[in-house]
């Protein structure tokens, strides 16, 4: 009897774990498509974040029995069978008179979430520790957002929540072999810009370098994920996130394991695919790979026309991604050095040096005086300068002459009255002109300071802080992104309305306010 009970418990446990990896489209075939292609919810992310009120098999049985009846109402069926998340989270009213610092301090509590207890069939991936969400429609942890959020948490002396969030990411690496885009099952086919090693650096400021040893296993596991298949590639070949260049160097690209429409943007992807000449699977993978980059979407992934239909993310070697992996290689090397393992220290240091040489070879454009992305299929740099070109300064890959040229272009072309514009193209995409984003402002400011460009760095910081505070003073909100050219106009583009909250904006703003002693804001 006891054996039967244990067997039954094990079966239930296996079923529960399996359910935690299934996506809404897998759980609700047919119903998922009907909902996402309808106008029930303006935002496709709403349904995939909904929680089933009962077993999906029972929901599907009822749906299949009722869907063809004249009296069937799809919206009523959904509302009867799912808990629908609030459109933009709980309503929070700002106190503008208390100032932006007090607002950020309050937002840490508003955006704080208790670690999630597993709910069977929910798309939410449970985590062992508490965390901070970005805000708005983004109700879960996101990978690269979190680093910039942590910059502010550290300024607020909230080391415990930084520890908790890093612990969550280590847990995800141990469980899945990588950190997903966000903590939803529909994100389990891709990651995001690998900032985990940067998070460890941040925590080391409070706890010392031993944290590199503590998380060495996870740093190596993440590296294995990004480098999977590299050793078997011939020159000019690619596999997943890895490309062996035609001259033999190993560099990385963004990738997604799926070639289907994104579940959280299903209708938009279906509609966009109708306008491309690419095969559907290729188009969807390029769209998904851009989502892994965090720059969804930008002309940096497109041909000279800047049309979304020409998106070619998987053909592009992104300068920012490879700078981050250079840092990861350095971090792993340092962790071994701290352990006294000089052999492994030299192995990873060598990997980092080879990558640095390759970044300089393929990404630096003397003609533009800028670090560019590189199209490895066409064997040429991509057509557009983007703010991703500041990453080699942040990681001290550029030499002093290159850094000086980057500074000139930042000052003469990227710098606007509200901060640094992301690109020069007005495509209507949210990662293009006239929009600007907190993480890129921070990388540029911090990078410039590492090359003794303190004056320009301060100007950028002051312009950006001014934009943030002006919008806050007029709206009581800190936004996901800002229009830095037409500063009286809200930022636009993208697949969803402008979001407020906002984790990485709060983090970068507080970091800069403290760095530049802007106590009057």
Image: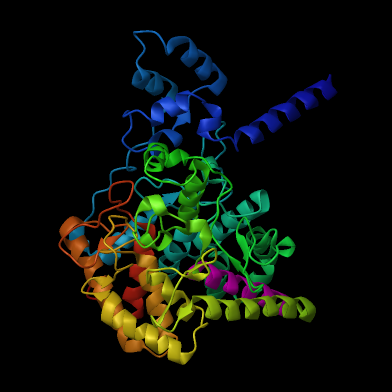
Q: Nearer the viewer, residue 358 or 179?
A: 358
Residue 204: image location, x then y, percent: 57, 73
Question: In which image quadrant can residue 74 be found?
Answer: top left
Question: Which quadrant does the C terminus fall into?
Answer: bottom left
Q: Please give the name of the residue rendered at 40% of the width and 85% of the height, measured from the top-left corner.
A: 449
412 lies left or right of 164? left
Please name the residue shown 70% across and 32% down the image. Answer: 14
Q: Which residues are magenta?
A: 319-337
| Relative image position of residue 44 (x, y in whole percent) | 38, 37
Q: Is residue 355 above or below residue 28?
A: below
Q: Is residue 331 magenta?
A: yes
Residue displayed at 69% across by 70% down? 213
- Residue 454 x/y as whole percent: 35, 88
- Quadrant of the rendered image containing residue 85: top left
Is residue 111 visible to us here? no
Image quadrant in which the N terminus is located: top right
Observer-nearest of 122 and 287: 287
Q: Position of residue 319 (x, y in %)?
A: 49, 71
472 on left or right of 201: left
Report the residue at 29% width, 75% height from top. 414
């Amino acid at each position: 009897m006891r054996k039967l009970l244990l067997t039954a418990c094990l079966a239930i446990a296996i079923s529960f774990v399996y359910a935690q990896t299934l996506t809404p489209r897998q759980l609700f075939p047919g119903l998922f498509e009907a909902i996402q292609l309808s106008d029930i919810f303006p935002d496709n992310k709403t349904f995939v974040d909904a929680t089933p009120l009962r077993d999906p098999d029972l929901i599907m049985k009822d749906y299949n029995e009722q869907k063809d009846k004249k009296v069937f109402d799809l919206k009523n069926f959904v509302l009867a069978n799912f808990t629908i998340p609030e459109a933009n989270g709980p309503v929070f009213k700002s106190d503008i008179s208390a100032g932006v610092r007090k607002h950020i301090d309050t937002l840490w509590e508003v955006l704080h979430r208790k670690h999630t207890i597993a709910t069977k069939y929910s798309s939410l991936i449970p985590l062992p520790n508490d965390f901070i969400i970005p805000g708005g429609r983004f109700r879960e942890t996101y990978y690269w957002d979190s680093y910039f959020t942590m910059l502010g948490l550290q300024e607020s002396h909230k080391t415990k929540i930084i520890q908790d969030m890093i612990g969550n990411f280590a847990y995800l690496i141990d469980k899945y072999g990588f950190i997903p885009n966000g903590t939803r099952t529909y994100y389990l086919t891709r990651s995001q810009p690998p900032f985990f090693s940067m998070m460890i650096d941040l925590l080391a400021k409070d706890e010392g370098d031993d944290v590199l040893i503590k998380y060495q296993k996870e740093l190596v596991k993440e590296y294995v994920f990004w480098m999977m298949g590299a050793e078997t590639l011939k020159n000019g070949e690619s596999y997943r996130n890895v490309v062996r260049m035609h001259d033999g160097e190993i560099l990385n690209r963004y990738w997604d394991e799926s070639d289907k429409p994104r579940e959280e943007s299903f209708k938009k992807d279906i509609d966009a695919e109708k306008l491309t000449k690419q095969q559907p699977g290729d188009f969807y993978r390029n769209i998904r790979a851009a989502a892994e980059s965090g720059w969804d979407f930008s002309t940096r992934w497109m041909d000279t026309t800047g049309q979304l239909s020409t998106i070619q993310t998987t053909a592009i070697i992104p300068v920012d991604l490879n700078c981050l992996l250079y840092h990861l290689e350095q971090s792993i090397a340092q962790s071994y050095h701290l352990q006294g393992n000089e052999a492994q220290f030299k192995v990873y240091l060598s990997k980092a040096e080879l990558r640095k040489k390759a970044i300089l070879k393929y990404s630096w454009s003397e003609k533009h005086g800028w670090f560019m992305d590189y199209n490895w299929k066409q064997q040429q740099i991509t057509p557009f300068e983007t703010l991703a070109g500041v990453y080699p300064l942040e990681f001290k890959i550029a030499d002093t002459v290159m850094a000086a040229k980057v500074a000139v272009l930042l000052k003469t072309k990227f710098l606007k009255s509200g901060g640094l514009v992301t690109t020069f193209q007005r495509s209507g995409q949210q990662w293009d002109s006239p929009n600007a984003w907190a993480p890129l402002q921070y990388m540029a400011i911090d990078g410039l300071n590492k090359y003794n460009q303190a004056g320009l760095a301060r100007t950028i910081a002051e312009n950006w802080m001014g934009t943030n505070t002006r919008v806050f003073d007029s709206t009581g909100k800190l936004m996901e992104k800002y229009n830095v050219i037409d500063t009286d106009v809200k930022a636009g583009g993208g697949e969803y309305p402008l979001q407020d909250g906002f984790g990485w904006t709060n983090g970068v703003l507080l970091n800069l306010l403290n760095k530049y002693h802007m106590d009057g804001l």
